Amino acid sequence: MKTFVFILFVGVFFIGCNSTKDINNRNQEIVSYTDNDTISISNEELEYEIIIIEPGFNAWLVSTAKPEGFYSQQYLENKNIFYVTEWNIRASQPLNYNPNLYEMQIDYRSGIDYGYEVNYKLYNYFVYFQIKYNQELGVGRPRI
């Protein structure tokens, strides 16, 4: 499985991909919730993995974030492209932005169908990150 490692401020975020196949088939997805608010979603056949390790994120996702299905996948993909672009700009400028918050760039590409669940959790991580660390990855505060 190809994976790319991205270290976030208090966590680790991995995305690997090499397929444009539809990955919405939930029967092939493995979702596990482990200690320390670690969320892992993977699909070995389609070679992607997302791992979010962030104290408080899982509780926030369950209690505060809009439920799955609230946003369309297209909306989440558009927001994620925007947030990833801004994140990568900041990660490439450690003298201008806190390098402890933006340690590495994220490899998220438009045109690849990561599926609803990956997009949902990535989007919500960006919202959580902006609120928790008082950051704005766009114009204004994120919507909850």
Image: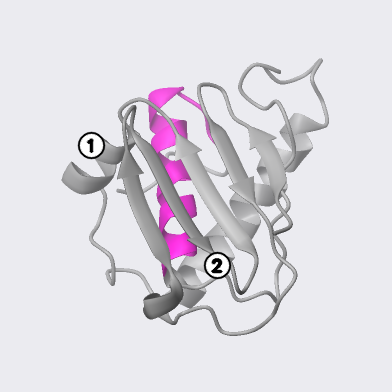
Q: Vertical placement of 21 versus 118: above or below?
A: below
Residue 3 visible (yes or no) = yes
Relative image position of residue 90 (x, y in whole percent): 73, 32
Q: Vertical placement of 21 versus 115: above or below?
A: below
Relative image position of residue 33 (x, y in whole percent): 31, 45
Quadrant hosting residue 64: top left
Labels 1 and 2: the sequence-earlier one: 1
Q: Secondary structure at mark 1?
A: helix
Q: Vertical placement of 65 versus 48: above or below?
A: above
Query: Which residue occupies 67% across, 74% down?
Result: 112
**Which residue in the structure is indicated by mark 1?**
59
Relative image position of residue 85 (x, y in whole percent): 71, 49
Q: Is residue 15 located in the magenta-colored stretch of the structure?
A: no
Label drawn at residue 104: none
- Image: magenta residue range: 117-136
Q: Amino acid at mark 2?
A: Glu
Relative image position of residue 142 (x, y in whole percent): 41, 44
**Which residue in the structure is indicated by mark 2?**
77
Q: Quadrant of the N terminus?
A: bottom right
